[in-house]
Image (cartoon, rainbow, N blue to C red):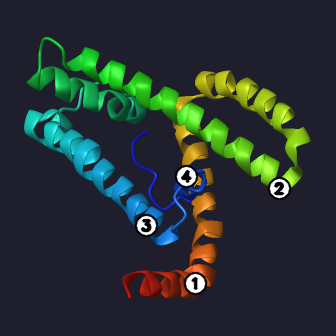
Amino acid sequence: FSNEAGMGSSPIAHATTTETNPVKQGYLGMIDPLLDTLLVCTVTAMIILISGEWAVSPEGMSSGALQGTLTARSFAALFPHFGETFVAGALFFFAFTTLMAWSVYGDRCVRFLLGDKWSVPYRMAFCIIIPVGALTELEFAWAFADLFNGLMAIPNLIALIFLAPVVFKLTSDFLA
């Protein structure tokens, strides 16, 4: 729920800015994954490594259960009084804000591709799919999410190739 760098979703958010210079906004957009990766992902990885929980393999737990609880177990091992509560709260807010952001991103895309009249049906479908995803087997849900996150990178990479000359020109003009 923390890092989705390269998926092509952040331009949707950055396009709503009031900044008129695309290079300034681009520089700001590059800071997002840097801070996110350094702060959230690196700190989480360090806590998992320092706690030693990554080496624990409880009998009878599936690999999905191990992956899902590794962060909580690691925080609990290093911060016994509030570690698990902190992870549960952080996970709630990361998941909630991810749902809200993807709802807005999808709505903007539907409006752009199909028009404003498809916004309400999209929102209804989005709200129906949330409990379906929550009730689906964990391993299937992650495989499904991984597949579509990977597929989202394809149009983003194509756009990067075609827009590279524009980016280079705007950046050199800005730096000059």
The mark lying in front, picked from 4 and 1, is: 4
Residue at 26% in and 31% down: 71
Q: Quadrant of the N terminus?
A: top left
Image location of residue 75, percent across then percent down: 18, 26
**Foreground tag (3 vs 2):** 3
- Label placed on residue 17: 4
How far is disc 3 from disc 2 in space, using C-alphas? 27 Å
Residue at image point 56% right, 50% down: 13
Q: Amino acid at mark 2?
A: Leu
Residue positioned 27% across, 42% down in the render: 40
Q: Nearer the viewer, residue 29 or 171?
A: 171
**Vertical comparison of 142 with 79: above or below:** below
Reading the image, the residue beneath label 2 is 113
The three-letter code of the residue at mark 3 reads Lys
Q: CA distance from mark 4 to mark 1?
A: 20 Å
Looking at the image, tell me whether mark 4 or mark 1 is earlier in sequence order: 4
Gap between marks 2 and 4 measured at Cα: 20 Å
Give neighbour class at mark 1: few <14, some 14-19, many 20+ (Cα, 10 Å). Answer: few
Q: Tag 2 or tag 3, which sits nearer the N-term?
A: 3
- The residue mark sitting in front, 2 or 4, is 4
From the viewer's perspective, is the residue at label 3 or at label 1 nearer? Answer: 3
The answer to whether 55 appears left or right of 93 in the picture is: left
Q: Quadrant of the C terminus?
A: bottom left
Secondary structure at badge 3 equals helix
Q: Earlier in the sequence, mark 3 or mark 1?
A: 3
Is residue 152 at least partly visible in the picture?
A: yes
In the image: residue 128, left or right of residue 150 = right
Q: Residue 149 in the image: x percent, y percent?
A: 57, 53
Mark drawn on residue 166: 1
